[in-house]
Image (spheres, grey):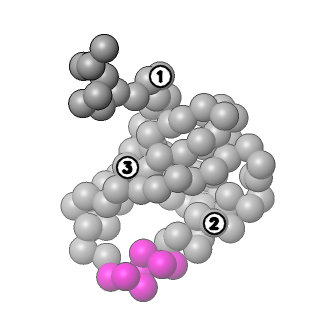
């Protein structure tokens, strides 16, 4: 599967309580179950008014379908081509 970063505009998500985040994760998991095995949620980073979610997916269309089913907008979907880290500078 291919790796994607999904940016979601979610006003005030950064101030959400743990229970609200738990409920959001459960909603996402229900949508994922409907779309399995074509998509996997890896993790999400929560900022003030956005989340940045890492997914493994067959294609962008299945991510858009997840957004429709879950009700969480997929503002921007970017496919990750490669990863680098500090060790990339070493031979």
Mark pair 2, 3: CA separation: 16 Å
- Residue 80's place in the image compared with 74, above or below, is above
Q: Main secondary structure of the magenta part?
A: helix
For image coordinates 76% across by 52% down, the residue present is 36
Q: Earlier in the sequence, mark 3 or mark 1?
A: 3
The quarter holding residue 51 reads bottom left
What quarter of the picture does the C terminus occupy? top left
Q: Which residue matches tag 3? A: 52
What secondary structure is found at the residue carrying circle 1? loop
Mark pair 3, 1: CA separation: 17 Å
* Residue in the foreground of this view, choosing between 89 and 57: 89
- Residue 12's place in the image compared with 64, above or below, is below
CB atoms at circles 2 and 1 under 8 Å apart?
no
Q: Earlier in the sequence, mark 2 or mark 3?
A: 2
Please provide percent x and percent y for residue 72.
Answer: 50, 58
Q: Which mark is residue 29?
A: 2
For disc 1, the neighbor class at 10 Å (few under 14, some 14 to 19, many from 20) is few
The answer to whether 50 appears left or right of 63 in the picture is left
Please provide percent x and percent y for residue 86.
Answer: 24, 30
The answer to whether 57 appears left or right of 21 in the picture is right
What secondary structure is found at the residue carrying circle 2? helix
Q: Earlier in the sequence, mark 2 or mark 1?
A: 2
For image coordinates 52% across by 70% down, the residue present is 25
Q: Which residue matches tag 1? A: 81
The answer to whether 45 appears left or right of 78 in the picture is left
Give, as a single range, the part of the protein colored magenta. 17-23
Q: Is residue 19 magenta?
A: yes
Residue 64 appears in view? no
For disc 3, the neighbor class at 10 Å (few under 14, some 14 to 19, many from 20) is some
- Front: mark 3 or 1: 1
């Amino acid at each position: 599967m291919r790796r994607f970063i999904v940016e979601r505009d979610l006003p005030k998500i950064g101030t959400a309580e743990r229970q609200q985040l738990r409920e959001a994760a459960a909603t996402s998991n229900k949508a994922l179950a409907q779309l399995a095995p074509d998509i996997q949620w890896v993790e999400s980073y929560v900022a003030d008014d956005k989340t940045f979610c890492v997914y493994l997916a067959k294609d962008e269309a299945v991510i858009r379908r997840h957004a429709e089913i879950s009700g969480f907008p997929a503002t921007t979907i970017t496919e990750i081509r490669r990863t680098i880290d500090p060790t990339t500078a070493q031979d």
